[in-house]
């Protein structure tokens, strides 16, 4: 995989990314529906939703702005700063979604 162009890897992995996001939204909605009163008042749940929207917004910006030059990335060993920033924001956002989601299950407030 290290010797494959990033544009090809991105093209191959995107169907799985979209499917995973759709599954996460559906199961998250069902979980919220089962415990709406508890989730709605939880600060951790609100943080989770915020970071989920941030992750989705980051992905949309990446797809429609940052990815326009993806073929040029194959020529260099390191992606450009906007792509790296999008990657870091994605890692931080999804980590926060996971942490806030776990905290929602055990929060008393």
Image (cartoon, helix red, strand yellow):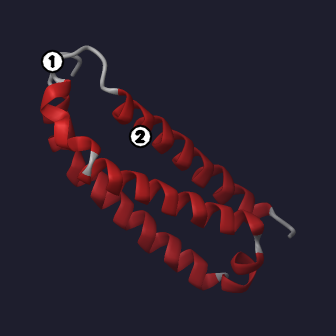
**In contact (CB < 8 Å): disc 2 and disc 1:** no
Coordinates of residue 101 in the picture (x, y in percent):
64, 59
Using the image as rendered, state which of residue 14 and residue 85 is in the foreground.
85
Name the residue: 58% across, 84% down.
33
Q: Nearer the viewer, residue 108 or 53?
A: 53
Q: In the picture provided, is 45 more to the left or to the right than 53? A: right
Q: Residue at x 29, y 58 (%)?
A: 18
In the picture as drawn, the residue positioned furthest to the right comes out as 108
- The percent position of residue 31, horizontal first and vertical second, equals 57, 75
Q: Is residue 33 positioned above or below 53 on the image?
A: below
The residue positioned 76% from the left and 71% from the top of the image is: 42
Quadrant of image for the C terminus: bottom right
User: Which quadrant of the rendered structure holds the N terminus?
Assistant: top left
For marks 2 and 1, give the CA distance: 19 Å
Q: Is residue 41 above or below residue 13?
A: below
Element type where label 1 sits in the image = loop
The residue carrying mark 2 is 86
Identify the residue at image location x=81%, y=64%: 107
Choose top left, top right, bottom left or bottom right for residue 36: bottom right
Q: Sequence order check: which comes first, mark 2 or mark 1?
A: 1
User: Toward the viewer: 83 or 103?
Assistant: 83
The numbered mark at residue 75 is 1
**Where, by quadrant of the figure, is residue 67 drawn?**
top left
* Label 2 Cα neighbours within 10 Å, binned few <14 / some 14-19 / many ≥20: some
Image position of 71 with respect to 49: above or below: above
Q: Measured from the top left, where is residue 100 in percent x and y?
A: 67, 56
- From the viewer's perspective, tell me whether residue 9 is left or right of residue 100: left
The secondary structure type at the circle numbered 2 is: helix
């Amino acid at each position: 995989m290290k010797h494959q162009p990033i544009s090809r890897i991105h093209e191959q992995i995107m169907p799985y990314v979209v499917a995973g996001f759709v599954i996460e939204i559906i199961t998250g909605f069902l979980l919220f529906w089962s415990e709406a009163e508890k989730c709605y008042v939880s600060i951790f749940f609100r943080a989770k939703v915020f970071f989920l929207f941030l992750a989705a917004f980051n992905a949309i910006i990446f797809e429609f702005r940052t990815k326009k030059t993806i073929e040029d990335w194959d020529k260099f060993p390191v992606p450009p700063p906007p792509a790296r920033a999008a990657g870091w924001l994605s890692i931080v956002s999804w980590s926060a979604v996971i942490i806030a989601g776990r905290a929602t299950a055990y929060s008393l407030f």
